[in-house]
Amino acid sequence: MNKYFTFIDGLRGLSVILVFFFHIKILEKNIFLEGGFLGVDIFFVISGFVITHILLIDNLKLLDNKKVFFIRRFRRLIPALIIVLCLVLLISIFYTSLNGIERINQSAFANFFQLQNFLFFLQTGYFELNSNERPLIHTWSLAIEWQFYIFFPLILRILINNRKLFRLIIIILIFISEFLSRVDSNLNFYFTIPRIWELLLGSYIYTLENKELDFLKKIKIIFYPSLLASVLILLNANEFDRHPSIMTFIFFIPLIFILKEEILYKEKKFIYLFIDNRILTKLGKISYSFYLIHYPTLYFLRLHFNNLSVVESAAYSLLIILFVSVLFYHFVETKFRNTNIISDTKFFKIFIPLILVLVILTFSNQHYLNKKKLNLPEKIISEYEKEFPIQNCFDVKKSHLKINDWYCELNPKAGKAKFIVLGDSQAFSTLPGFLNFSKNKNINGIAITQSGCIPFLQIHLKNKKNKFDCYLHNKKVYEFIKDNGIKNIFLVSRWNYYTRFSKLIDLYNSKLFPSDENKRLKIFEAGFKKSINFLKNDETNIYVLQQIPTASKYPYGQYLDLYSNEFNLKKRFLKLSTKEIDYIEETKEINEIFNKDKNYVNILNTSNVFCDNNRCNIGTIDSIYYSDEHHLTYKGGEKIYDVISHLSFD
C-alpha cells in the first residue's frame, strides 16, 4: 500500500511540474516545455487508477456506499478550491482590469457548479493568447474529474465484470476523441466525453486481470521504445497537434506498465529510481494545492512584474507557489479531509460560511463593476461598441477557393481600384482610415483581410477550425494583383505575433512549427522577400504599415477604471499610455527586416500618429482608439488616415 502511494505521488509530482513549465508562458510569451500540457492527461489516468482503488478497496465498501464516497471526494477537493476562488476574487479587485474581474466572476460562478469546462469552451481556446487573461482557466480539468465521479461509481461494477465491454468503451471513446480533434479542437479539448477515456484507462489498468497481466509481461520488451516515444512526444508536442487523440494513447503506453509494478519487477529499481525520488514524491503530496494555486499566482505575478526575464519569472513564481502550496496542503487539504480533525457535522458548519464568503465576493465584485460602468461617458461607450460598416472585407471564408465574390471594394463608384490592402485582423481594424482615404481622394481601393493570415507568399498558415488555408489565400491574392494590374499594395499586420507568439508560421510543405523566435524571424524574412520579389517592378509601389503600438492592458477596462473617480482625471489619464521605447524594442527585429528592402518598399510609421512625448496612447481623455490590446476601434482605425493621407495615386 505504502509503495503504491509513493510512486503515485512521484507521478503526480512529475505531472504538476510539467504543467507548471508549460504555463510559465503566461509570464513571458515563451514556453519552457511546449508539451507540458500532457501533464494534465497523466493526472487523468492517475485519477482513474486511484479512484478505482478507493472504490474497490476493503471489499467494495465504498462502491456499495456511494454517499460516503461522494462526501470524501467533496471534502478532498472542494474546500481548497473555494478558498482559492475567494482569494482570486479578492486580489482581482486590486490588480485586475474591470474586464478581468468580469471574467473571474464568471469563472468563479461556473466553478461553483463545476461547469467551468463548458464556460471556457464558449469563451476561449486553451492555447489562445487571451487564455492568459483568465486566472482560473486551469480549473477546467477539475470539472472533468468531478463530472466523471458522478457517473463512474454507478457503472464500475458492470465494467469490471465485463472486460470486453470495458475495452470496447475505451476504444470507442478514443476514436470519438480522434474524430473530434479533426472537427473542433476546442470541443475535443474541453468536453467531458473526449476526456473520459483517459480516466477509464486508469481504471482499466488498476483492474487488470491475471491473463491481461501475463500478456503485458510477454510484450514488456516494448516498454523502453514506448518510453522513448513518450519523451519525444512530450518534447515535440505543441498546441497545434490534435489532442487528445490516438497519439495521446501512444503517449500513455509506458504509463500502463509503470502503474502495474508487477509487470516490471526486474526493471523496477531502474524505472522507479526516478519516479520514487524524494523531490517528486514530496511534490506529489502537495500536487493538488500546487495545481490550484500555480496559475493564479503566475497570472498576478505577470500583472505585478513585467520586467523580469523568463528565468527569473520561473524561479520567483516556483518559490512562491511551493511556499503557498505547502501551507495550503497542511492547513486546508489535510484538515478538511481528516474526519478526526473536522467531523462531517463540523465540516458543513465551516463550509457554509465559506460559500457565503464566495457569494458575497462575487456579488461585491459585480456591484463594483456595474458602478464603474455607470460613470463612463456615453461617447466612449458608443466608440467602443461601434461596428465597422465594411464587415464583408474581413474573414471571407471562400477567399482561398477559386470562386468569385471574395473581396470588397472601399469606394466602387470611383472606378477601377488604384490600391489594395492585405493583412490580418489588425489590418481589418485599420480599414476606416483607408475608407476615408479612398473617399477623400476619390479613388477606389480593395481590401482583403483574413484573421491569422500574414500577407506573405511562401509562408503557410492554416486555420484548423474552419480549414482555411492561408497559403492558398495569399497565392490567389498575389495572382489577382498581377492579373488586375494593381500598382499600390499595402501590407498590414500585427507583425510580431507571427515571430514572437505564434507557432503557425512555417515554410510551405514543412511539418515543423519552430518554437524558437530566431528561426521564426528567418522564416518571416524569407516569406517577406518572396512576396517583394513577386510584386516589385518599376511601376509598383509597395507600402508596409509598421506595426501599430499595442495597449499594455485591456483599454476599455482602463477607461472604466479612469472614470470611476473624477479626481485628478487628466493626470491619471497620462498613466494609461505605454512607453514608446517598449514599442520600439518589441518591433525592432521586424523593422530591421523591412529596412533591408527599403529600396523596394515604403515603410509607413504608425508611431507618429499613436505616440507623442515618448508615450503611446490608447486614446484621448474622451475618445478610445483600441477595442482590445491589439486592435483598433472604428475611431482608432480612422487615425490611419493621418499615416497615409500624404499619398497620391492619380
Image (cartoon, grey):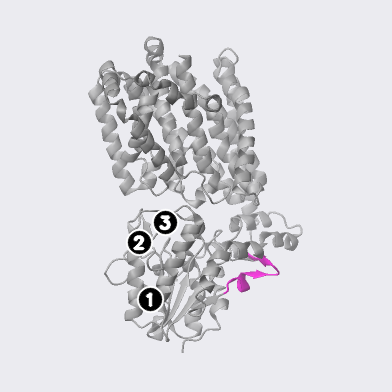
Where is the N terminus found, in terms of image quarters? Answer: top left
Nearer-N-terminus badge (1/3) = 3
Q: Residue furthest top?
A: 59
The type of residue carrying mark 1 is Phe
Number of the label disc, if any, that sits on residue 173: none
Q: Nearer the viewer, residue 84 or 362?
A: 84
Residue at (71, 69) in percent of width and height: 613
Q: Residue furthest bottom?
A: 650
Residue at (43, 71) in percent of width and height: 529
Where residue 562 sits: x, y (%)? Answer: 68, 57
Looking at the rendered structure, the secondary structure element under dot 1 is helix
Q: Mark 2 and mark 1: span between their CA atoms?
A: 16 Å
Looking at the rendered structure, the secondary structure element under dot 3 is loop
Q: Image height check: is 12 above or below 624?
A: above
The type of residue carrying mark 2 is Tyr
358 with respect to 492 (left or right)? right
Mark 3 or 2: in front is: 2
Q: Nearer the viewer, residue 198 or 107?
A: 198
Q: Mark 1 and mark 3: span between their CA atoms?
A: 23 Å
Nearer-N-terminus badge (2/1) = 2
Q: Which residue is mark 1?
A: 534
Where residue 225 sits: x, y (%)? Answer: 34, 34
Number of the label disc, if any, that sits on residue 508: 2
Number of the label disc, if any, that sits on residue 504: 3
Taking the magenta stretch, the answer to whether it contains residue 590 is no
Circle 3 packing at 10 Å, graded few (<14), some (14-19), many (20+), is: many
What are the residue bounds of the magenta stretch? 605-621
Mark 1 or 3: in front is: 1
Circle 2 packing at 10 Å, graded few (<14), some (14-19), many (20+), is: some
